[in-house]
Image (cartoon, helix red, strand yellow):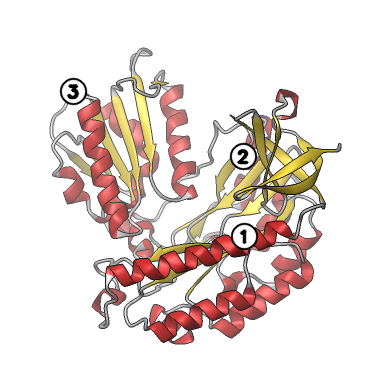
Amino acid sequence: MSSERKVKFCTLGCKLNFSETSTIAREFEQGGFRRAQPGEKADICVVNTCSVTEHADKKCRNLVRRLIRENPGALVAVTGCYAQLSPERIAAIEGVDLVIGNGDKGSVYRRVAALEGKSGAAVHACEAEELTGFFAAFSSGDRTRSFLKVQDGCDYRCSYCTIPLARGASRNMPIADLVAEAEAIARSGQREIVLTGVNTGDFGRTTGESFLDLLRALDGVEGIDRYRISSIEPNLLTDEIIAFTASSRRFQPHFHIPIQSGCDRILALMRRRYNTARFAERIAAVRRAMPDVFLGIDVIVGFPGETEEDFACTCDFLERIAPAFLHVFPYSVRPGTPAAELLGRVPPEVAECRASRLGGLSQRLHADFCARHAGRIETVLWESTLRGGYMFGYTGNYIKVRAPYDRSKINTLSRVELFRGEGDTMDAKIIG
């Protein structure tokens, strides 16, 4: 492949996709390609897609069509969850050359190289039985933070979710290999790692190891100052994991935990593996060990059969447990899932209204969480973003802060005093 050729990467969806795209990009760069600059036409376009909602599917199609228009003659390769679940819809878009399912995502570079000079959309590895291997991946390019893929797939069968169809069964790499990946990230100069996966806490299905084993091993990697767990199911957030995180210098007091509904009737329809009492007990256990923990919680509104009373129950529950942030999603029908057959569809405008109401609650809860930290001393890892004369970073418990830009501080840790700031960002005075 010519060293003069340019490649463009576009990623939709989760942190897991970003880690995979970054790994694919490194293969192209090692093969002599360079990344196209913004506005520059590319010879190759690679799209890593998402299919978590109907809106995500539409966004994927629109992005692919736009790339084809803006990069005439480019070879266009599409991979990811939407490519896995709907390869025929992607292949039918004029200008698409390659459709690669999640089972062969690690071969994107090789497939592109083999396809050059051929015509027509080639489709590879989009059958469910091919979702068995593990594509090792971590992100690079961000000066401060890397997303490390530790697990893939899911054995849970929540009634609304296509992830088991798109990603396959739960599987993982050995801990020793992941430690080696973390050491490579440390050598690159990145100081924070976010552990990513489809069902991260289910780590160990392939190797017989445990998620706690993994945390302990990663905690010993020199050069990494911080770890965050991107998401963990409440039923997998054990007392041992909580105690380890609370005692670790590197693992931060920050958990992202999906609840999806604060109503037990809806949780049962969703086929979740807990009820609100169990969820509340896990939140209380985390707070006993880490009083200042940041808790981000996923919620789905407008699930089939959700009444105003059910939604009110969710609102009351969320008010009571008072997380720091809510990630709110209107329910989206996913063909092939049990929820798609349920009666009592909630009109889209009603679901959007409920999402908006929870969005307002989230803003208030986050403002309250930040306000409680005014005047406190915290440690911040500074990122490279420069905006309006300020640099930005996050405390260990994930409060976004800003201070006057100082290039020497980028990718370093500082002790700061926090003050009320603007919007969701607090002002910080560096004290050491």
Residue occupied by mark 3: 117
Q: In the visual, does 391 lie left or right of 202?
A: right
Instruction: Name the secondary structure under disc 2.
Output: strand
Amino acid carrying mark 3 in the image: Gly
The crowding category of the residue bearing disc 3, from other C-alpha atoms within 10 Å (few below 14, some 14 to 19, many at least 20), is: few
Q: Are marks 3 and 2 in contact (CB under 8 Å)?
A: no
Q: Is residue 293 above or below residue 108?
A: below
Q: Position of residue 55 (x, y in %)?
A: 29, 55
Q: Quadrant of residue 295?
A: bottom right
Instruction: Name the secondary structure under disc 1.
Output: helix
Q: In the visual, does 177 lie left or right of 110?
A: right
Amino acid carrying mark 1 in the image: His
What's the residue at 59%, 75% (across, down)? 319
Mark 2 vs mark 1, foreground winner is 1
Mark 3 vs mark 2, foreground winner is 2
Instruction: Looking at this view, name the residue that lies furthest to the right.
Output: 432
Q: In the visual, does 206 lie left or right of 268?
A: right
Question: Foreground residue, 54 or 22?
Answer: 54
Residue 209 in view in this figure? no
Between the residue at mark 3 and the residue at mark 2, the CA separation in whole angstroms equals 38 Å
Q: Is residue 255 above or below residue 222?
A: below
The answer to which of marks 2 and 1 sits earlier in the sequence is 2
Between the residue at mark 1 and the residue at mark 3, the CA separation in whole angstroms equals 53 Å
Q: Position of residue 46 (x, y in %)?
A: 33, 34
Looking at the rendered structure, which numbered label has been put on residue 145? Answer: 2
Residue occupied by mark 1: 366
The answer to which of marks 1 and 3 sits earlier in the sequence is 3
Amino acid carrying mark 2 in the image: Arg
Q: Are marks 2 and 1 in contact (CB under 8 Å)?
A: no
Instruction: Name the secondary structure under disc 3.
Output: loop
What's the residue at 62%, 67% (across, down)? 323
Query: In the rendered image, which quarter contains the C terminus?
Result: top right
